[in-house]
Structures are given as structure tokens and as C-alpha cells.
Amino acid sequence: MYPAGFKLYRPASLEEALKLLDGFGEEAKILAGGQSLIPLMRLRLVKPSYIIYLGGIDELRTIAVDDGMVSLGALTTHREIAESRVVAEEAPLLREAASVIGDVQIRSMGTIGGSVAHADPAMDYGAVLAAMDGEVVVASVKGVRIVRFEDFILGPFTTRLEPSEMIVKIRIPRHGNWLTAYEKFAVRPGDLAVAGIAVAIRLEDGIIAEARIGVTGAGEKPFRAYNAEEALVGAEPGDAEAYKRAADEVYKECRDAPSDERASSWYRREIAKSLTVKALRRALDGA
Amino acid sequence: MATGNGGAEKTRVRVTVNGRLVEAEVPVNMLFVHFLREVADVKSVHVGCDTSHCGACTVVLNGRAVKSCTLFAFMADGGEVLTLEGLRGSDGGLHPLQEAFHEEHALQCGFCTPGIIMTLYDYFGRGGDASEEGLRRALEGNLCRCTGYVNILRAARRAAARLRIPRKGLGV
């Protein structure tokens, strides 16, 4: 179906975009890569009066490394992230998540800023950004604020963005020297995750000194599984008992896993549990 | 066209389609697939679904495969697009992908074929190898309702051999 008509704005700078957004507020929708918004508009589930298209704002299309963080402009596409050498070296979990979003055509257009703003509870970036304590940089005419990713997402398709605000950057701590894996399970290729688990492990003297586990798809929103992380600290790589303890904790922490047409709550929890072991094995294999 | 957008605002869109500049005032809510079919008269680009799943509308925009049904025409403004009509072999005849699809009988009804060929064009162009896994992953966004996938994969491997693409490479 054709989307309903709208009034189009194509700002050439961030400043101009923020001014427009300040004027229109909730009447306006921001369009980046369109891979979530356009399907919703085609089904006429969303009919914005104004569209502010960010495609002309090149300053939002950057990948940079600074003060311990990898910083991605909101318009960076999943494909650019998946193909970036800098991301592969400094934020390997993000590269892995980006490379399994949707299908290649969707990755060519879809952006990280759009994905985070859309706040699908099964977004692949969710597990990674939760695990590594990623940050969302938000701007309005009043200025810029930084919100921790896990706090930024309030629930399904709901964020802390005010109507006059937009995401300008996503930041994630560099983790090139951690042992990492992102495991996703979807019913069919290209589907959203039934569940996805990101793990990152830092070893000291051959034992697990720090563990991070992020979960997507198996909760009201992506989250960090703190108890599961705790269960791993002090264990050696290859300790199957420790992996099982962590997986059991993940299962417990997924108590809010939703039931919908793709999977029941119980199934999502079981999948999250088994993906935890799978991800730990892959991250720590041969360590 | 059955668009139901009579009153919609218009905007100017200039796109190079298979080397030819196409410029028009079009409704802001016109999807790129309709721009290609109805304004640029490029009919290999198909509308196969309403949900961005099927990939029959796949074209290569600025070097990357995209679903032209999930793009407003204005989003392609200033860009360069390649569709099946723009593919050529080095001798000016069929492109090796087209030849291989012909030889392996990799199409039944043919509706999905242009999209699949454009996806493979992008994949091989960016160093994708001819491994089973690589090809299957590359084609995740393209559906063939005749379920002719076996011959499609055969054709992809035949084209790869002709394009001197390794059976198993470093991956993309």
C-alpha cells in the first residue's frame, strides 16, 4: 500500500533539523534509513503529518574512536558498521550484531540511530549495547545530553526521547581486547530475534575477571543480566558448570519475556538460556 | 497509478538509472519502486509483497542492494541506481549472472529473478565467495515462491566460476 501523504522537510544541517523538530514536536517523524518507519507507514499504522528526512546531514554519518569509546553517527548504516575495520577491531560485538540484522538489503539502508529510536525489544544492537553499557547521545535546540542505553529504552517501542529531541550518536566502550560473541536465534532468516545474547569476557591470569552478558528479545526491553555475569567471575574458560550457572541465571532474569506470534515467553527463556552457553563457548573457545 | 495520493505534496527527484538521468516532480509519498517502474519505465523491478520481505524490488543503489519498495523516491535523489536492465557482459551481451540463470534454468515464473540477480551482483561485487553458506546468507532477503532455490544456487555458483570468484574466500 502507498503511505499516506505528508509534508516533507529535508534539512541540510543538524541545527536546521533540530529547529524543525522543536517546532513540530509529536506531529513530526524523523526519517533516517526508513527500514522500520516505511513498512509501518505502508501499512498505515503510522501517519505522520510531517517528515523530517535526515539523509542530507553528512555530519551524522561518522565512525570515530575517542576517549575509550567508539562513536557512531546516528545515520551510520548496519552495513557500514558490519564492514568497518575500526568497528571490527574496537567494538567486535557491534560488528557481529550489525551483520545479522534483517537481510542485506535492509542493512544497506537501516541505521543504528533509527534502530535504537525504534526500540524494538528484539533489536540485535540491544544485547550488545546493554552488555557493554553503551550510551545514546541525544540533541535538541536546548543542547546535548547523554543517556545510558539501558535507561534510554523504557519498554517496547518506548524511549526517553522527548518530542523535540533526536539521537545524534551511539557510543560504546572499546572492547577489542575482550573475548566476545553475539548469538541470535530467529525462526526464519531475516526475522527478528526470538532471543539474542551478547557476551564479553575479560580474563586476568587465565581466569574470568569480568563478564558482561546482554539479553535482547527475552524481556520488555534489552537488559544486562547482572546475576549471570556474577556467576562467571572467578571461573576458568571451559568450565561447563559455570556456563550452566550463568545460563540458569539468564533464564531467571528473563521473567518478563513476552509471548507473541513468534514465540511464547517460556520458549524465549529457554532459547536465551541455551544461547548463553553457545555464546560463552564460542567466546571462550581455545582461551 | 493506484496511489490514492492525489493531494500529496510534490518534490523534485533526480536519479541516474542505468546511466540515464531521470528527473521528475513526484509525490513525496511515492515509493522508489513506483518511481522506477512508472517514471523511469524500468519494469524488471517488481512489487511482490507489502511488507519488505520478498526482495523482488531489489536494485543496487549507490553500490548497495536495497529494497526499492522500502524507500521513498526522494531518498534516492542524487543517487545512481542499477537494475537488471543495466547489466551487461564484457562483450555487451548478457552478464555472466544472466547467462548462468539461463543455463541452469534458475527461474520458473521469473518474478523474483531480477531481485535475486541484483542481490548477487552486489554480493559478488563486494568480495562474497561462492560457498553454500555465503550464498544462502546473501539471499536471505529474496524469496522465490516457486521454491526454485536449488537451481538459483547452482546458477550463482556457475556465475561465480565465470566471474573468477573463489569457492571459499575470506567472506564479507
Image (spheres, coloured by chain):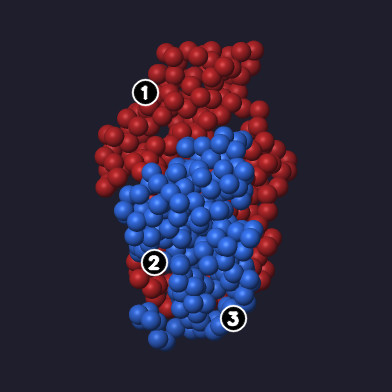
Chain colours: A red, B blue
Q: Residue at x 27, y 34 (%)?
A: A266
Q: Is residue A278 left or right of residue A88?
A: left
> Can residue A160 be seen here?
no
Q: Name the amino acid type tagged 1.
A: Asp
Q: Name the amino acid type tagged 2.
A: Val
Give the residue number, with chain letter if any, for mark 3. B23
Measuring from the top left, give residue A199's x and y in whole percent.
51, 30
**Distance (Cα) linking label 1 and label 3:** 59 Å
* Number of dots carrying numbers: 3
Q: Are marks 1 and 2 in contact (CB under 8 Å)?
A: no
* Earlier-in-chain disc, 2 versus 3: 3
Discs 1/3, front: 3
Question: In which chain is the residue bearing label 1?
Answer: A
Residue A205 to residue B39: above or below: above
Q: Residue at x 71, y 47 (%)?
A: A64
Residue A158 to residue B75: above or below: above
Measuring from the top left, give residue B8's x and y in whole percent.
44, 83
Measuring from the top left, give residue B92's x and y in whole percent.
62, 64
Q: Name the amino acid type tagged 3.
A: Glu
Q: Which mark is residue A248?
A: 1
Give the residue number, with chain letter if any, for mark 2. B47
- Same chain for mark 1 and mark 3? The answer is no
Measuring from the top left, give residue A28's x and y in whole percent.
48, 71
Question: In which chain is the residue bearing label 2?
Answer: B
Q: Residue at x 40, y 86 (%)?
A: B6
Q: Are marks 1 and 3 in contact (CB under 8 Å)?
A: no
Q: Residues within 10 Å of mark 2 (few under 14, many from 20)?
A: many
The quadrant of the image that shows the N terminus of chain B is bottom left
Question: In which chain is the residue bearing label 3?
Answer: B
